[in-house]
Amino acid sequence: MSKLKSLDGLFAGRHFDCDVIILCVRWYLRYKG
């Protein structure tokens, strides 16, 4: 159970990073455009 919880936390962390990267790219394109 502990291992599954750790894996779920890792996935959530990666998903969060992905969302942040997408937001940064959107802001960058908006300022550049």
Image: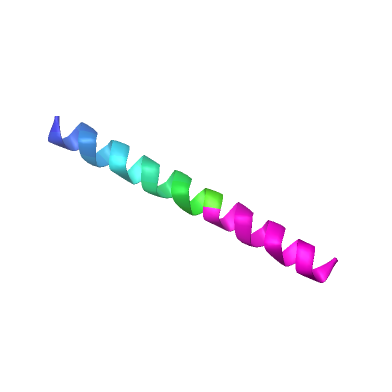
Residue 31 percent coordinates (x, y): 77, 69
Q: Position of residue 5 (x, y in %)?
A: 22, 35
* Magenta segment includes 1: no
Extreme residue toward the left, this view: 2
For image coordinates 14% across by 29% down, the residue present is 1
| View extreme (right): residue | 33
* Left or right: 33 in relation to 28: right
Q: Is residue 31 above or below residue 16?
A: below
Residue 26 lies, with reference to residue 15, above or below; the image says: below
Please say if 32 is above or below 24.
Answer: below
Residue drawn at (43%, 48%) of the image:
14
- Residue at the far top in the pictured view: 1
Residue at image coords 78%, 62%: 30
Q: Main secondary structure of the magenta part?
A: helix
Q: How is the image coloured?
A: rainbow
Left or right: where 24 falls relative to 18 = right
| Number of on-image labels | 0
Residue 24 magenta: yes
Residue interval drawn in magenta:
20-33
In this picture, residue 19 sits left or right of residue 1: right
Horizontal placement of 3 versus 23: left or right? Answer: left
- What residue do we see at 28% from left, 39% from top? 7
As displayed, is residue 29 above or below residue 13? below
Q: Position of residue 33 (x, y in %)?
A: 85, 66
